[in-house]
Image: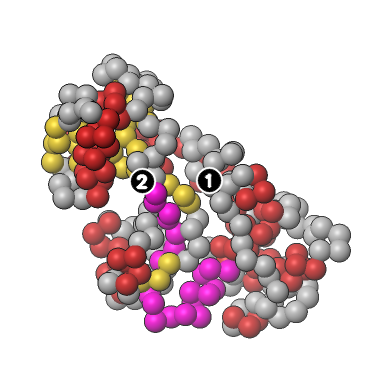
Amino acid sequence: MFGDANAVEFVPLAAVDRFEAVASGDVDVLFRTTTWTLLRDGQLRMDFGPTTFYDGQQLMGRRSFPLDERSTVADIDGAVVCAVPGTASEQNIAEAASAAGVSVRFEPVQPGTDALEKFQRGACDVMTGDGAGLVGNKAVNDPGDEWVIFPQTPLSREPLGPVYRSDDSLWGDIVSWVVFSTIIAESKGISSTNMTLPPGDSEAARLMGLEGSLAADLGLEGDAFAQVIRQVGNYGEIYERNLAPLGLIRSSTLNDLAENGGLLYAPPIR
């Protein structure tokens, strides 16, 4: 949006450090697996931008248990499950197991990589986490395709998106409309390789800064959103570049465009 996609500093953050980094101003915006919740909106005084990925808690086990992609919680009877004690993740599994009439035992783990390490060495039969995170772990650590992720319907709703300080509303507007611009561009067929506007589409013209001064009203250059699309692409391009290689299928999921049956759409540019 500032004309140079390389003019950014990425700061790796552990989950325990992420909100303090925002509150202290060490980072301007948090783009990390962070679920939008009432507690974080209120008690932590954080504000959330648009949801950029709809995720949910799932489980990962082994085919030798035996489990497969069609397995449900009912199939983990007698399993040892790695989970951080006292978390919503542990509670969700306990409640789901109870509802399914099966018994599981929890192996306590610390936040971070402890669960994956214990799962890899067999200290637990099943580990849990957001589906996208499990897919990433499997892609990196399971070349033999022994691990399986299930159930197909997640145990929870985890809307993920950008986070910024609640005392910076103009910056929040900029973050939100940068995200929206990538969604609108995809819906109109505008991409980094095809900056051609649909004929007679005034909204597309406003998005590209060819009509009106909406980007300028946010303190940006008039073509700021066109720069976003030109340099990093629309939402679909960003997804294909970063998430598709991990095996995260988008078509006909919640992360597809609304016109394709998903939940992604943006407010109008007017």
Residue drawn 65% across the image and 77% down it: 215
Q: Which mark is residue 224?
A: none
State the residue in front, 220 or 258: 258
- Expressed as whole percent of the image width and height from the top left, the position of residue 218 reads 59, 80
Can residue 237 be seen here? The reply is: no
Magenta-span inclusion, residue 212: no
| Number of marks in the rendered image | 2
Vertical order, 167 against 74 (above or below): below
Q: Quadrant of residue 79?
A: top left
Q: Which mark is residue 156?
A: 2
- Quick one: label 1 or label 2, which is nearer the N terminus? 2
Q: Quadrant of the C terminus?
A: bottom right
Vertical order, 65 against 221 (above or below): above
Q: Quadrant of the N terminus?
A: bottom right
Q: Residue furthest right?
A: 199
Which stretch is magenta? 156-177
Residue drawn 80% across the image and 60% down it: 197
Please name the amino acid that badge 2 sits on: Ser
Find the distance from the CA under tag 1 to the CA under tag 2. 14 Å
Q: Which mark is residue 254?
A: 1
Residue drawn 16% across the image and 50% down it: 86
State the residue in front, 256 or 225: 256
- Expressed as whole percent of the image width and height from the top left, the position of residue 20 reads 27, 69
Graded by Cα atoms within 10 Å as few (under 14), some (14 to 19) or many (20 or more), the crowding at tag 1 reads: some
Q: Quadrant of residue 90?
A: top left
In the shown orientation, is residue 167 left or right of residue 91? right
Residue drawn 39% across the image and 81% down it: 167
Q: Quadrant of residue 115?
A: top left
Can residue 55 be seen here? The reply is: yes
Q: Secondary structure at mark 1?
A: loop
